[in-house]
Image (cartoon, helix red, strand yellow):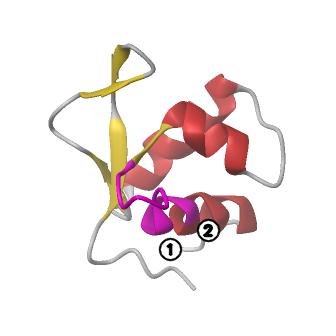
C-alpha cells in the first residue's frame, strides 16, 4: 500500500502524540501539519488511513477544550516508511 508524504506525516504526528503522552484529536493534528488542509480534507485522509489499518479511533471520547472529542492512535502496522 503506497501512502503519500502527507499521509505519512499524519501517521507520524499521531504516533508521537502530545508531549504529555495523550492522544491527538483532529484539531491538534490540523495545527501541527506542515501544510494547511481543510478540516474536511483531513477527515478524508484520516478515514483512508483508518481503512488501511495504520491508525484507529480511540473507542472513548476524551474531554478537550470543554467538548468530547475523538482521538486517534497508531496501530501496530503503522510504520509506512
Q: Residue 9: where, in percent of width, then height?
A: 65, 64
Between 27 and 55, the one lying in front of the other is 27
In this rendering, the answer to whether 62 lies above or below 33 is above
Residue labelled with disc 2: 8
Instruction: Determine whether the residue tagged by mark 2 lies in a helix, strand or loop.
Output: helix
Rendered residue at 57%/86% (across/down): 81
Most common SS among magenta residues: loop
Label disc, if present, on residue 65 of the rendered structure: none
Instruction: Determine whether the residue tagged by mark 1 lies in a helix, strand or loop.
Output: loop
In this rendering, the answer to whether 11 lies above or below 25 is below
Task: Determine contact: label 1, label 2, CB under 8 Å.
Answer: no
Is disc 2 surrounded by few (<14), some (14 to 19) or many (20+) residues within 10 Å?
some
Residue labelled with disc 1: 1
Q: Nearer the viewer, mark 1 or mark 2?
A: 2
Q: Which residues are magenta?
A: 13-23
- Magenta segment includes 73: no
Rendered residue at 26%/77% (across/down): 76
In the image, is 46 to the left or to the right of 36?
left
Q: Residue furthest top?
A: 66
In the image, is 5 to the left or to the right of 69?
right
In the image, is 11 to the left or to the right of 9?
left
Whole-number angstrom distance, CA of label 1 to CA of label 2: 12 Å
Would you identify the image quadrant in which residue 66 lies? top left
Amino acid at each position: 500500500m503506497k501512502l503519500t508524504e502527507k499521509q505519512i506525516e499524519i501517521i507520524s504526528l499521531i504516533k508521537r502524540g502530545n508531549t504529555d503522552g495523550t492522544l491527538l484529536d483532529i484539531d491538534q493534528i490540523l495545527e501541527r501539519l506542515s501544510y494547511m488542509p481543510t478540516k474536511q480534507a483531513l477527515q478524508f485522509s484520516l478515514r483512508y488511513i483508518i481503512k488501511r489499518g495504520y491508525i484507529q479511533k480511540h473507542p472513548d471520547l476524551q474531554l478537550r477544550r470543554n467538548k468530547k472529542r475523538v482521538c486517534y492512535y497508531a496501530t501496530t502496522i503503522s510504520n509506512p516508511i
